Image (spheres, grey):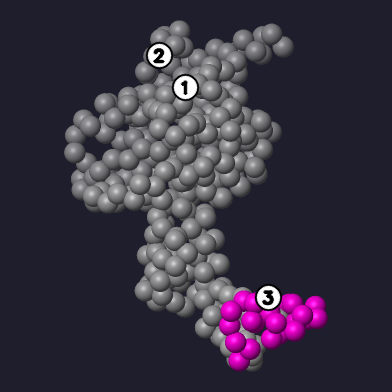
């Protein structure tokens, strides 16, 4: 809309008639707008749209239905159709793609540089973490697991499980990892590497990284090798737990995943890269070595 420009130029001394003639509309149209420049509905929709943009920025996988739910929870009164119309006008769509539909959207731009460059080695704990999300079907629907692995010992230092793949899933896993590893003083400066998933590009996750003074890192588009060490963990989980049987409920699968990570993967599964030690044994040995050296 060019009417605000006419008003600004008039305040600077440019005649309204001249500006309207140059821009191609009548003085009457401008004065009609000037009498009521913003309707109450326009004002409400502007605030509603800003709120919808904030919700989508925090959870880019949200479509208009989830956005409408979040707006209602925040106290906004708007029908789902109204939210759909505003989202459509502003091209606010879910970052995930439904089966059978091709929107040819590319993954979003990285919000962090690739600080690992496929160097999956570390000289100490809490130097490099890898994070990713996997999913599996149950009789009640999908269950999502976000896990964080320490490159030094291959230990899963934090994880979160939920029925919805929202940014809060990744944030919860990060909170869990920081808590388990001793808090901010122990993890500050650690590199946290992920792919370009919307959960990791979300403002919530990026704020959490900065809050804990962690260094975000992201791989390239379509380059699975950029997070290969994390993919190998999910492959092992798939073979040993997820694909071993069908799961009737989410709680059943959740309990099995937690038991396998804590009891089997951490304490019984020996890894050649760790000198045939388990992740817990490997960390214990190196902690003792550091203590003796000190």
Which residue sits at x=63%, y=35%? 214
* Residue 145 in view in this figure: yes
The boundaries of the magenta stretch are 8-28
- Please report contact status of discs 2 and 3: CB closer than 8 Å, yes or no: no
Measured from the top left, where is residue 144 in percent x and y? Answer: 36, 43
Q: Which mark is residue 21?
A: none
Among the two numbered marks 1 and 3 on one chain, the one whose residue lies closer to the N terminus:
3
| Dot 3: element | helix
Cα distance between the residues tagged 1 and 3: 60 Å
> Which is more N-terminal, label 3 or label 2?
3
Residue 60 point in image, percent of width and height: 46, 53
Picture residue at 60% right of the left edge, 24% below the top: 127
Position in image of residue 257 (x %, y %): 34, 35
Give the alpha-carbon distance from disc 2 to disc 1, as whole Å. Answer: 9 Å
Residue 122, located in which quarter of the rendered image? Answer: top right
Q: Which structural element holds mark 2?
A: loop
Real-space Cα separation, disc 2 to disc 3, in angstroms: 68 Å
Q: Which residue is mark 1?
A: 154
> Which residue is the site of mark 3?
5
Q: Is residue 9 left or right of residue 207?
A: right
User: Residue 20 versus residue 172: which sits nearer the camera?
Assistant: 20
Q: Quadrant of the N terminus?
A: bottom right
Q: Which residue is mark 2?
A: 271
Nearer to us of marks 1 and 3 is 3
Answer yes or no: is residue 4 visible: no
User: Measuring 45% from the left and 27% from the top, which residue is drawn there?
Assistant: 227
């Amino acid at each position: 809309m060019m009417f605000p420009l006419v008003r600004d130029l008039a305040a600077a001394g440019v005649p309204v008639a001249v500006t309207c003639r140059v821009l191609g509309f009548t003085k009457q149209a401008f004065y009609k707008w000037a009498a009521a420049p913003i309707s109450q509905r326009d004002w409400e929709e502007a605030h509603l749209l800003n709120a919808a943009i904030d919700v989508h920025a925090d959870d880019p996988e949200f479509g208009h239905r989830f956005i409408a739910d979040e707006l209602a929870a925040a106290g906004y009164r708007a029908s789902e159709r109204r939210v759909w119309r505003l989202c459509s006008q502003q091209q606010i769509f879910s970052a995930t793609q439904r089966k059978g539909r091709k929107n040819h959207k590319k993954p979003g731009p990285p919000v962090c540089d690739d600080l690992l460059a496929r160097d999956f080695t570390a000289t100490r704990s809490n130097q490099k973490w890898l994070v990713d999300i996997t999913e599996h079907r149950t009789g009640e629907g999908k269950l999502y697991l976000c896990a964080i692995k320490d490159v030094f010992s291959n230990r899963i230092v934090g994880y979160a499980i939920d029925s919805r793949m929202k940014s809060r899933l990744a944030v919860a896993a990060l909170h869990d990892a920081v808590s388990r590893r001793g808090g901010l003083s122990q993890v500050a400066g650690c590199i946290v590497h992920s792919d370009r998933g919307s959960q990791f590009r979300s403002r919530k996750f990026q704020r959490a990284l900065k809050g804990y003074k962690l260094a975000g890192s992201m791989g390239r588009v379509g380059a699975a090798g950029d997070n290969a060490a994390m993919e190998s963990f999910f492959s092992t989980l798939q073979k040993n737990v997820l694909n071993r049987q069908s799961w009737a409920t989410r709680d059943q699968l959740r309990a099995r995943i937690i038991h396998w990570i804590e009891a089997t993967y951490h304490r019984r599964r020996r890894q050649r890269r760790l000198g045939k030690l388990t992740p817990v044994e490997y960390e214990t040995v190196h902690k003792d070595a550091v203590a003796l050296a000190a």
